[in-house]
Image: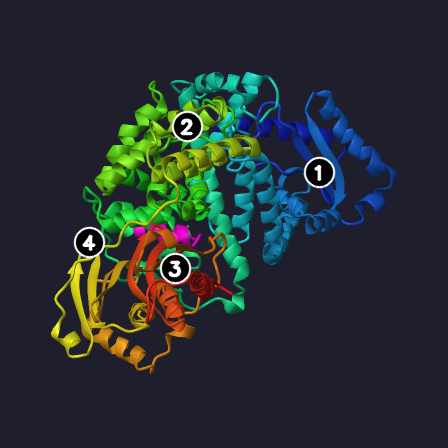
Amino acid sequence: MTAADRVARTAAADALCAKAYDDAGGPDTGVALVAVGGYGRGDMAPYSDLDLVLVSDEGVAEERGEWWAEFAGQVWYPLWDTGMKLDHSVRSLPEMLTAAGADVRVASGLLDVRHVAGDPNLTLRLRTTILAQWRRQARERLPELHEMVRNRHRLIGELAHLSMPDLKEAEGGLRDATVLKSLTATWLVDVPAADLERCRVHLLDVRDVLHEAAGRATDRIAPEFWTPLAEGLDLPDERAAQRHVRELGRRLTHLSRLAWRRADDAVRRTPAARPRRPELERIAAGVALSKGEVVLDKGARPAQDPVLLLRAAAEAATRDAVLAPPTAARLVRECPPLPVPWPDEARQQMVRLLAAGRGLLGVWETLEETGALARILPEWERIRLLPHASVIHRFTVDRHVVETCVEAAALIRDVSRPDVLVVAALLHDIGKGGLTEHSVAGAPIAREIAERMGFAADEVELVAQLVRWHLLLADIATTRDPDDPATIDALTEHIRTPEALALLTALTEADAKAASAKAWSSWRAGLVLDLSRRARAALQQGSVPPAFRVEEIEVPPAALAGGVSIEVAPVDDGARVTTVAPDRVGLLADVAAMFALRRVPVRAARVWSQGDYGVSVWDVADEFLDAGALRNQLDGIAARRVDPAQRLAPRPAAEGELAPTVVVRPEASDHATVIEVRAADRIGVVYQVSAALAGLDMTVRSAHVSTLGPQAVDVFYVQEASAGALSETRAAEAAHTVRAAISPE
């Protein structure tokens, strides 16, 4: 059935209803027969119901007495005699308006009222009054409607990823198309009308073919209907039919999520609080935030910045904001291709994006819809909208992979290389879609992608190893005798280091949780984690941070004279700042505050004591630093003319942000106490830690500061100011003080 066929079917039904109205002696004024709650004119499918309301002007029923009750039956019975499926009711105009005011679903449905017979002026009054009421009450009613929509989505799932898609009720289905029309009617948000109508009409085509194939009214596509759908839609095969339906659902889902984000923002912003000018908050180089959406700032130069697309995506995901689709589309058009291998910043931004948690989902969706993924990760096409063979999976392969990244983001504190974990999570099923077992096929693909991203050779092999063996831990744990020594050997034969084992354990948990609740039951989790624990003991007890080694540098004249030397050297995508000064308790805190107060993002740092001097080398994401300005800032801090403590106090934790961890590693050094700090990557963490230690009269003899994706991993070698390593009591005091210093109140 084509759209024209549906229009003809609707017109025929309307004509039949109009004849029944006229034959029953329906008046020309004061009464109207209307159709309610469809998807718009011309949408009638085979086996669909017709929802009719006999509407009267106020007082008509009372005036006409017994005739009115008989009249309604004289309209309905001839329609039932024809076999038409009919939902019907009789209401006065005031009753309709009251019902719309009491139930947001009724109000939304009445926006699609169409005249069938009787008084057209009454129908027009009904429509215009309902529409005016809807617009006037939109700010109060949209939150209720949104909650209903969310509940339906949670109950049914997504059309694009369900094993048995529901064309009507699923997220991205026909019900959402109706809701989007209701949102547009409020005038608070706009939805691309042509795109919405295209998806809606194509879904109606699918529903028509489904009804014909099933021989009844149904909205759920059971597996046996994919082949008839392919034939009815003139598509090559069942796989093409699945992709067609899922792409429509994904596009409608994308439009719906964007529209609701903007509607929620419009509801929060009262007209009086609305700014007269567009608000632009610069959040990164070339990137700004406006009304909850990440856009380009006025200084952006996409043609000169190949990393700008990933930077914008990472900022949007970590803030759980919208990556504005026009912005993403422009960046796809104008940004030059990333060089191979990627620059460090590109890899770091990709890791930030993947480790962003739930904020990743919407941004990844936008990257797909705008064609950005084809540039960033061309291999994605092989798993895009690919159904899983196993019924245990909730989602298609591509969505499962993104969900695995979301789950892995919550486990990054459990591993030494969170960047490797989230990239392995992204690529663990990249080998699916072919005839070769997917972990075998995926390992070389993952190796090639990791090399392109610019990972070091050992990191590339670690990613490939995780992809190759991502099923191993769960398989052995659930199929082998845990008391048999050969069980441990079967695992350690392929996974030979504690680092790789910790990464595989986290990936196994994330993969299972992303599949379904049943895949990570308490029983299964217990088996996997117990095997991992015993295998780790077999490989090595505990984990020791690598030894910290530095090369001595020549002390500059300014430092020899008792002052501070600051040198700034440009590097790719930023600068390297070297500071040298006479060593003292609190020197590191002052230098860290210098960068934090100037809002300079620190990617990595090395700090050490060289004789009587403190040396630090900082790699920062700011290529326009001035050594003189930095020196003035440091002088003000050291002289206590500037107090950084209040300005750099921990900010409230973002929703879903992991709590910081502080661990003492007594086994890691004989001459110092090693304190490992993991916290969300944000301005001021190094200052907060080093200031807390300085307040205890402890000195940092060396430190290794690094950013791995969305978190800072900082290792401090701490001594008493006048002695060596800390006692157990002092080490515990240091850990407690540092934890309190970096934890939001």
- How far apart marks 1 and 2 lie (CA) works out to 71 Å
Q: Earlier in the sequence, mark 2 or mark 4?
A: 4
Q: Residue 124 location in percent, x, y?
A: 63, 47
Q: How crowded is mark 2: few (under 14 residues within 10 Å), some or many (20 or more)?
A: many
- How far apart marks 1 and 4 lie (CA) works out to 61 Å
Residue annotated with mark 3: 289
Residue 604 bears which disc, if any?
none
- How far apart marks 3 and 4 lie (CA) works out to 21 Å
Q: Earlier in the sequence, mark 1 or mark 3?
A: 1
Along the viewing direction, whichever of 215 and 599 lies nearer the viewer: 599
Q: Which of marks 1 and 4 is nearer the N terminus?
A: 1
Task: Look at the picture and state if 608 lies above or below 384.
Answer: below
Residue annotated with mark 4: 304
Task: Look at the picture and state if 652 lies above or below 190.
Answer: below
Residue annotated with mark 2: 488
| Amino acid bearing label 4 | Gln
Task: Look at the picture and state if 534 lies above or below 655.
Answer: above
- How far apart marks 1 and 3 lie (CA) works out to 47 Å
Q: Which of marks 3 and 4 is nearer the N terminus?
A: 3
Most common secondary structure along the magenta stretch: helix
Please identify, in this view, whether the residue under mark 1 or under mark 4 is nearer the observer: 4
Magenta span: 311-321
Do the CB atoms of the residues marked 2 and 3 lie less than 8 Å apart? Answer: no
- How far apart marks 2 and 3 lie (CA) works out to 51 Å
Is residue 9 rendered to the left or right of residue 712?
right
Q: Is mark 1 on a helix, strand or loop?
A: strand
| Amino acid bearing label 1 | Val
Residue 348 included in the magenta stretch of the image: no
Q: Residue 387 location in percent, x, y?
A: 44, 26
| Amino acid bearing label 3 | Leu
Residue 53 bears which disc, if any?
1
